Image: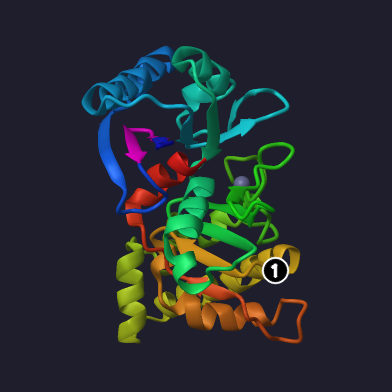
């Protein structure tokens, strides 16, 4: 029987899993080792091979193919990695190198795509919308990202990578005119407006005080910090605008909100209310907004499902 092998490549840890079925209860083995990214690309490749050898040795199993979740995207046109915050990967033909080193086919997708695929296949989505056609997975945390999952004609959900490998890259749509400069070269991207660091930066600029996102939310709930109210209002309003773009283009059955900021309850109520002003549907939204249920496991499970 075919098992599902997945590797989640992070900046500090590499995690590997073997699943016997697409279910969180079907974990055969799960292991993690240090990435040691500072030692360079070849070292990262050898760490991945070492982890896969450990999985093989401890289970006696052999992969027929392996899925990889990565911090950036695989560019099909250039056949190399891009947009990785583990920057030694950028420009490297990681997919071909891994296929050659492992001797089996490999699939590569970024972490937001893996999150979207895992939650759509074995997370919250099957519980709520089992017959979905399209799901958009959002990560709103330190960064902002997204992934599109579509149910194929064979009934199996797959990730829409896109022609240039940037399918679902919602975090770098421009949301605020003349907004904060982004590392991607543009200004006012979603990530520079509604990520945790961007909201904290806004609070600090207006109030002159540094506070964490959690402190800002607590102070908003207490109701006597005007700047906390402004920050939360800004988050909701811009979330509404940003999410309306997804609905107008994809009109997905569900949007799963992951990441630290994605956990804020108000997004599911007031945030959706704000989006109603901007969707092309007479101020009505039937899209399900869902909290993820796989937690930190979504990355490695999603990789295994690739
Ligand atoms: Zn950007």
220 up-or-down from 175: above or below:
below
Nearer to us in this view, 250 or 35: 250
Residue 158: tell me if it is visible: yes
Query: What residue did someone put label 1 on?
Result: 251
161 to the left or right of 231: right
Nearer to us in this view, 121 or 289: 121
Q: Residue 173: name its quadrant.
A: bottom right
Give the structural element (helix, strand or loop) at label 1. Answer: loop
From the top left corner, tell me how far across and down residue 57 is, in percent: 24, 21
From the top left corner, tell me how far across and down residue 122 is, in percent: 43, 57
Residue 203: tell me if it is visible: no
Q: State the residue at coordinates (53%, 68%).
A: 130
Q: In what quadrant of the picture does the N terminus appear? A: top left
In magenta segment, residue 58: no
149 up-or-down from 73: above or below:
below
Nearer to us in this view, 244 or 3: 3
From the top left corner, tell me how far across and down residue 205 is, in percent: 46, 62
Dominant SS in magenta: strand
From the top left corner, tell me how far across and down residue 39 is, in percent: 35, 16
Q: State the residue at coordinates (52%, 62%).
A: 194
Q: Callout 1: 10 Å neighbours few (<14), some, many (20+)? A: some
Q: Residue 208: name its quadrant.
A: bottom left
Residue situated furthest left in the rendering: 58
Q: Which residues are magenta?
A: 8-19
248 to the left or right of 130: right
303 up-or-down from 135: above or below:
above
């Amino acid at each position: 029987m075919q098992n599902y092998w997945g590797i989640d490549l992070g900046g500090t840890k590499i995690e590997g899993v073997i699943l016997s079925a697409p279910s969180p209860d079907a974990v055969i083995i799960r292991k993690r080792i240090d990435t040691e990214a500072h030692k360079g690309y070849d070292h990262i490749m050898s760490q991945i091979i070492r982890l896969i050898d450990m999985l093989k040795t401890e289970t006696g199993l052999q992969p027929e193919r392996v899925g990889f979740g990565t911090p950036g995207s695989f560019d099909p046109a250039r056949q190399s990695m891009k947009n990785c915050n583990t920057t030694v990967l950028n420009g490297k033909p990681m997919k071909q190198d891994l296929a050659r080193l492992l001797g089996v086919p490999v699939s590569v997708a970024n972490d937001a795509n893996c999150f979207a695929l895992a939650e759509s296949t074995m997370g919250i989505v099957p519980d709520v919308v089992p017959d979905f056609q399209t799901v958009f997975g959002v990560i709103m945390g330190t960064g902002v990202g997204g992934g599109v999952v579509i149910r194929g004609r064979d009934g199996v959900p797959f990730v829409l990578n896109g022609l240039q490998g940037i399918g679902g890259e919602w975090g770098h749509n421009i949301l605020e005119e003349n907004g904060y400069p982004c590392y991607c070269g543009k200004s006012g991207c979603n990530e520079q407006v509604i990520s945790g660091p961007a909201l904290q930066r806004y609070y600090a600029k207006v109030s002159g005080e540094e506070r964490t996102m959690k402190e800002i939310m607590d102070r908003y709930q207490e109701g006597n910090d005007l700047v906390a109210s402004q920050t939360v209002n800004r988050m909701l309003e811009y979330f509404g605008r940003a999410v309306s773009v997804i609905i107008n283009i994809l009109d997905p059955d569900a949007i799963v909100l992951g990441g630290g900021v994605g956990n804020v309850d108000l997004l599911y109520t007031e945030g959706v209310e704000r989006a109603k002003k901007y969707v092309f549907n007479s101020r009505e939204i039937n899209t399900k907004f869902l909290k993820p249920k796989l937690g930190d496991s979504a990355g490695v499970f999603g990789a295994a499902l690739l």
